Image (tube, coloured by chain):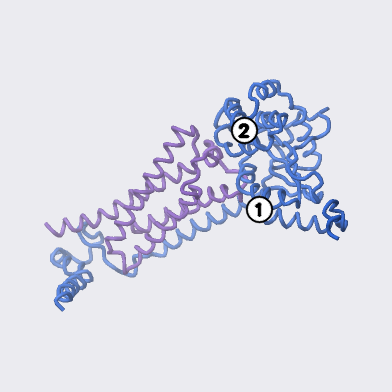
Amino acid sequence: MHLYTPLLAFASRTLPTQRTRNPSRKMPANNDRPRDRNVPPRNTVRESSGSNRPKAFFWILGLIALVGVAALGYVASKPKSRAAEVRDVADTTNSGPAQGYLIGKVDAPVKILEYADFECPSCGGWATVTEPDVRTRIINAGLANLTYYDFPLNQHRNTLAASNAAACADEQGKFWQMHDRLFQAQDEWNGEATEQPKPFFKRYAGEVGLDVPKWEACFDARKYNKRIGANLADGLRRGVNSTPTFVIANKLYPGMRTYDEIKRLVDSAAATASPVPGAASSTSATKK
Amino acid sequence: MTKRMIVAALALAGIFIALYLTLYKLGVIGELSCSIGSCETVNTSKWSRFLGLPVAAWGVLFYLDVFAVALIGTLPRFENERLISVVLVAEAAVGVLFSAWLTYLELGVIHAICIWCVTSAVIVTLILVVSLADLRDFRVTDAGLGA
């Protein structure tokens, strides 16, 4: 009982004063002033009135929302094409046959081709966020294999060097380790972060366990420039004009894809590939 | 227009800027429209994530919250509620500190500036200034009445 008393007393004191705070405190201050003054004195509490949410406020909010939605809609629907810039990326003449980097079983039923640029942020997003799932659940499961082709865009200053770094890692059988490391650390070696990417690449070469002097000699000689040019030329021939672009069952899919999309495309490609029953060699012999 | 309405309008603009950067981070937008600075460098740097979420996504949540609080604060029922002003100032102060840290990273660590991030920092600073002015109205009131 005596617990409630102070609470009630407090409530009965506070509630009315909160509600009547304005009039009760304002009255004495305003009594001697004319009510119809246009500019209220500074030391009055703001009054509640319906006119405090003028239509102009909602018009302004509506306008900001309209401009924002329109601008976002426009940039989101704009094609991510970089065709104009890609045409300048040349040095693909006399580069010979394309030679990508394979991951997965050579005889996997579906083949995914990826055309990517080591410096492109979307490729980095794909490689670090989506690709791990694709590798675990599609490639390692034997549903498909993936071949990576360099598609260096010329607005990316360090991408060709990165392709070389990865190609030189491939020489020692560690392309994919270098590929992953390059994409993970894209923020520190990209063309806008540094003009000298080599120290970063050299560090990664050590981290992924390469013979660094051998890798360095290869990198300095730009030994695989032709291979990279050939991969780029292959992409251009296929009509690739943005990165990443995927080719699954001879169809071109530009832009980043989610795991689910890749899985759906692989499944439908596998379904139309008319698998030969019993062709799974060694296991078929043990079935009976 | 009351000061809270100005805060709401600024926060709404902030929502769209942060949303733009978030959509880029999620890969919905291929390239950032960035005539000044190096937006991609900043937004692909390792500092572009905070507690598992893109910094820009935190920005969207922050601005949505400020927008909601400011909008509620314009309702006749709440417009004399000092607590709304206190909350707005507190939130804006956190926002300014966070933006200051991000701007420091841009200038001092990443060595690249992202014009949209700077715009966001300016907006959050304006929100703080206007929120402080809003809160000050109450102080002036109390002081005036007390005298």
Question: Residue at (16%, 57%) from the top-left corner?
Answer: B144
Distance Cα–Cα, label 1 vs label 2: 27 Å
Q: Residue furthest bottom?
A: A1
Q: Nearer the viewer, mark 1 or mark 2?
A: 2
Chain containing the residue with disc 1? A
Question: Residue at (53%, 58%) from the top-left corner?
Answer: A66
Q: Which chain is blue?
A: A
| Residue position marked by numbered label 2 in the rendering | A208
Q: Is residue A126 above or below residue A99?
A: below
| Residue position marked by numbered label 1 in the rendering | A258
| Callout 1: SS | loop
* Residue type marked 1: Thr
Q: Is residue A142 above or below residue B45?
A: below
In the displayed structure, does residue B99 sit left or right of residue A78? left
Mark number for residue A158? none
Chain containing the residue with disc 2? A
